Image (cartoon, grey):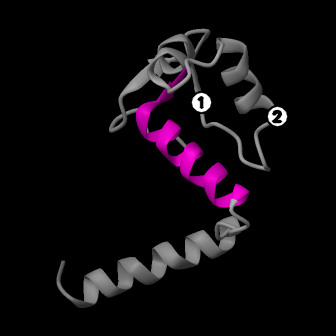
Amino acid sequence: MIDISSESLITLSEAAKSLPGRPHISTLHRWRLRGVRGQKLDTVLVGGRRFTSHEALDKFIARTTAAASGEQPPIRSPRQRERAIDRAERDLARDGI
């Protein structure tokens, strides 16, 4: 998921131009809709325009590379994620942070 407050948003056209091989913009739309090797490109819709981020591109490339190598990235359910956040918050509070 893209955090619009901390990630630098770019249009899909700009994203295509920044990637090696300069894939066509329709390729990026396919990546966000259908995905590659089970991984989808994260995007956000702002005012009717579709954006991604450099960070989302980096994550997408890392995930698809891992999937192509036979590695399975860890998949957590929303409940597992919430438990991990609660655990981390308790640890930080215990340490006075």
Q: Residue at x 72, y 31 (%)?
A: 31
Left/right of residue 81 with respect to residue 37 in the rendered view: left
Identify residue type, mark 2: Arg
Tell me the SS state at disc 2.
loop
Identify residue type, mark 1: Thr
Q: Residue at x 44, y 21 (%)?
A: 18
Total marks in image: 2
Q: Quadrant of the C terminus?
A: bottom left
Q: In the rendered structure, which segment of residues is drawn in magenta?
A: 51-68
Q: Disc 2 vs disc 1: Cβ atoms closer than 8 Å? A: no
Residue closest to the eye, 64 or 92: 64
Q: Residue at x 52, y 48 (%)?
A: 59
Residue closest to the eye, 20 or 53: 20
Residue closest to the eye, 57 or 1: 57
Location of residue 89 by image quarter? bottom left
Tell me the SS state at disc 1.
loop
Q: Is residue 48 magenta?
A: no
Label 2, on which residue? 34
Q: Position of residue 56 (x, y in %)?
A: 50, 39
Q: Position of residue 10 (x, y in %)?
A: 44, 19
Q: Nearer the viewer, mark 2 or mark 1?
A: 2
